[in-house]
Image: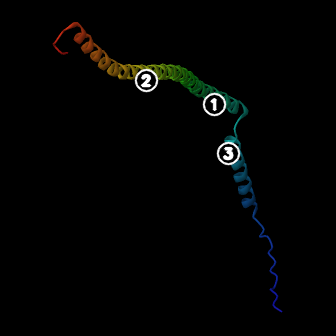
Amino acid sequence: MNSKPEISVEPIPKSPEEEISNTVRGDRLTERLAWLKPQPDVVGDVNQSIGELIDKVSATSIAEIEKLISDLQAVRDYLKAEGDRIQQEMARYAHLSDTASASVKIITEKLGQWRKGPTMIKTDNVSLEAKHGNSHAL
């Protein structure tokens, strides 16, 4: 079977100069990283300024949204009033249309009766004229 030979790695001993140099580098790196860590006072100031900025931005947005809401409510009220007005106008128009139709029907019936009526009256006039001795015809 294939088995790989194990290789043992021994650490290379470092010279004292290298160890001191690495320790100094590590200390410098630690100091740099400590400088980059946020300080509690600075974090508090940043959080407070960010909070104030958010409050200012949101206050403007909230005011605009409230204005839009009131504008939309005014438009809704106007449209509701106009809808009510139009329904009343339609009811009036329907009543006027019914009244006009009834008037036309009455006029048509009366005209029909009037056409029949004058012929009889004319006939009566002629007969009346004949009785009174008038010789001219109507």
Closer-to-camera residue (67/125): 125
Q: Position of residue 110 (x, y in %)?
A: 38, 19
Above or below 68: residue 11: below
Disc with the residue nearer the chain's start (1 vs 3): 3
Determine which quarter of the picture holds residue 137.
top left
- Mark carried by residue 50: 1
CA distance for labels 2 and 1: 75 Å
> Looking at the rendered structure, which numbered label has been put on residue 101?
2
Which of the two discs, 3 and 2, sits closer to the camera? 2
User: Amino acid type of disc 3?
Assistant: Arg
Distance CA(mark 1)–CA(mark 3): 26 Å
Q: How is the image coloured?
A: rainbow
Q: Earlier in the sequence, mark 2 or mark 1?
A: 1
Report which residue position mark 3 lands on: 32
Going 71% across and 52% down the picture, which residue do you hit?
24
Give how far across and how far down residue 36 sits, in percent.
67, 42
Of pointers 3 and 2, the one earlier in the residue sequence: 3
Left or right: residue 110 versus residue 70 is left
* Label 3 crowd (10 A; few <14 / some 14-19 / many >=20): few
Q: Nearer the viewer, mark 1 or mark 3?
A: 1
* CB under 8 Å between discs 3 and 2: no
In the rendered view, does 48 fall on the left or right side of 80? right
Which of discs 2 and 1 lies nearer the camera? The answer is: 2
**Which residue is nearer to you in this view: 49 or 84?**
84
What amino acid is at disc 1? Ile
Q: Residues within 10 Å of mark 1 (few under 14, many from 20)?
A: few
- How many labels were placed on the picture? 3
